[in-house]
Image (spheres, rainbow, N blue to C red):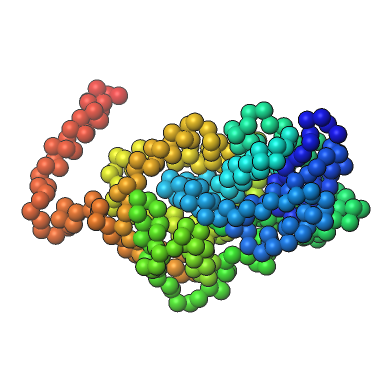
């Protein structure tokens, strides 16, 4: 036993990697391993976690329901910021990691554990997301990342190890892609998906109906927001987690929220991921629509300049960094008037905004109309244009 390794708290999911890691940690460090599992909305995947962890050798198992905190304190700020990574990814996995790591550190403190461990590979983004959060809460914590220590080189190696130790695993060599699920999305990567030309098999999808098989009749829904936060769907008030679950069901039924992209990982390589984010896609679409009538033009543009950076920081794992804290505060300052209702039409993979209204609206029909009005002098536009054209005219007059 390492003298500073009395206990290790492992972020445990019950999948292939963490099942093998739990046993490997016990053998490698000869100390107590405590399994921590965060329920962030992965559904039935969590049902057998306690039994699996104990059977694999965990001394204790913590399972914490974090679904409401996840949506309220992480997903909704994401929606308020309109954060999308590289134009497509709604950050479903990335946004869950700082919460999971925070809760894991709380268990480590409670248990007076000398170390924490995770199952992220040395190639991916999650290792950074977990560890930056660990160090935020305890700068001196010992972090164990088995994928950076052991001799295994592939998931097939892990499957073989699991067989020799009698560890049941949910992955076989014939179906080796991995998935990660929470209340915001489910992601798929690896295995057959590593060929970016290969179309995902329809049987892989979990949350969404294929758009071509979705209902032939569109469905309408209305979402009410208060200060940028969604509060009701079709007039019914829900808790944050319940609201997202309701929109997942609606969006999934109509094939909304599938994304297939090749993204740039923080460590430098490109990676192909397939995502299902039905409820998040609906909220993103609705929130932008409401902002279009409630936010001042220059405020919106200034905030929008920050969106790529906010998305990048979340993707990279800097949720608790000072620059992220500053930008979240700035986003919050833009949101008090983002209050109102958005009406959407859901149809075969499409989420279409067909109406928006707000008592805080800056839209003025009298100014915008193409019909006769009494509030705008069109002649004023001539001086506006000539002044804005002055530098262009001077440049041409001087032959530049």
| Quadrant of the image occupied by residue 316 | top right
Q: Residue furthest top?
A: 398
Depth check: give the residue in front, 29 or 253: 29
Q: Does the image show residue 195?
A: no
In the picture, the quarter occupied by the N terminus is: top right
| Quadrant of the image occupied by residue 7 | top right
Query: Count of labels shown?
Result: 0
Task: Where is residue 287? Give x, y as percent.
Answer: 39, 54
**77 left or right of 392 in image:** right
| Residue at 51 percent of width and 47 percent of height | 74
**281 left or right of 166 in image:** left
Task: Where is residue 350? Give x, y as percent.
Answer: 46, 64
| Residue at 16 percent of width and 52 percent of height | 367
| Residue at 45 percent of width and 77 percent of height | 217
Task: Where is residue 102? Give x, y as percent.
Answer: 60, 42
| Residue at 38 percent of width and 42 percent of height | 332
Q: Residue furthest bottom?
A: 216
Q: Residue furthest right?
A: 164
In the picture, the quarter occupied by the C terminus is: top left
Q: Does the image show residue 74?
A: yes
Q: Residue furthest left?
A: 374
| Quadrant of the image occupied by residue 207 | bottom right
Task: Where is residue 204? Give x, y as percent.
Answer: 67, 64
**147 left or right of 263 in image:** right
246 is higher (above) or lower (below) than 73: below
């Amino acid at each position: 036993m390492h003298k500073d390794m009395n206990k290790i708290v492992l972020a445990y999911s019950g999948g292939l990697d963490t099942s093998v890691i739990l046993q490997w940690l016990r053998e490698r460090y000869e100390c107590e391993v405590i399994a921590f599992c965060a329920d962030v909305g992965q559904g039935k995947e969590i049902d057998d976690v306690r039994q699996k962890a104990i059977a694999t050798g965990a001394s204790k198992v913590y399972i914490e329901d974090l679904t409401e905190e996840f949506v309220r304190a992480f997903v909704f700020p994401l929606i308020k910021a309109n954060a999308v990574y590289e134009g497509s990814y709604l950050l479903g996995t990335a946004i869950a990691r700082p919460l999971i790591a925070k809760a894991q550190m709380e268990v480590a403190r409670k248990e007076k554990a000398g170390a924490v461990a995770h199952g992220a590979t040395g190639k991916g983004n999650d290792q950074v997301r977990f560890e930056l959060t660990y160090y935020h809460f305890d700068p001196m914590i010992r972090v164990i990342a088995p994928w950076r220590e052991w001799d295994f080189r592939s998931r097939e190696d892990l499957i073989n190890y699991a067989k020799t130790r009698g560890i049941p695993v949910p992955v076989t060599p014939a179906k080796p892609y991995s998935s990660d699920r929470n209340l915001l999305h489910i992601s798929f990567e690896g295995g057959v998906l590593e060929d970016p030309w290969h179309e995902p098999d329809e049987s892989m999808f979990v949350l969404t109906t294929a758009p071509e098989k979705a209902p032939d009749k569109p469905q309408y829904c209305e979402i009410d927001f208060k200060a940028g936060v969604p509060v009701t769907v079709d007039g019914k008030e829900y808790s944050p987690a319940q609201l997202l679950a309701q929109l997942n069901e609606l969006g999934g039924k109509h094939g909304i929220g599938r994304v297939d992209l090749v993204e740039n990982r923080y460590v430098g390589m490109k990676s192909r991921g397939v995502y299902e984010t039905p409820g998040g896609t609906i909220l993103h679409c609705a929130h932008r629509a409401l902002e279009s009538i409630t936010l001042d033009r220059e405020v919106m543009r200034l905030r929008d300049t920050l969106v790529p950076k906010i998305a990048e920081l979340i993707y990279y794992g800097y949720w608790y960094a000072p620059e992220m804290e500053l930008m979240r505060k700035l986003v919050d300052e833009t949101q008090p008037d983002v209050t109102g209702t958005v009406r959407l039409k859901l149809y075969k993979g499409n989420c279409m905004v067909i109406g928006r209204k707000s008592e805080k609206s800056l839209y003025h029909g009298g100014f915008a109309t193409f019909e006769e009005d009494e509030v705008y002098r069109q002649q004023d536009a001539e001086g506006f244009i000539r002044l804005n054209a002055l530098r262009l005219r001077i440049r041409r007059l001087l032959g530049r």
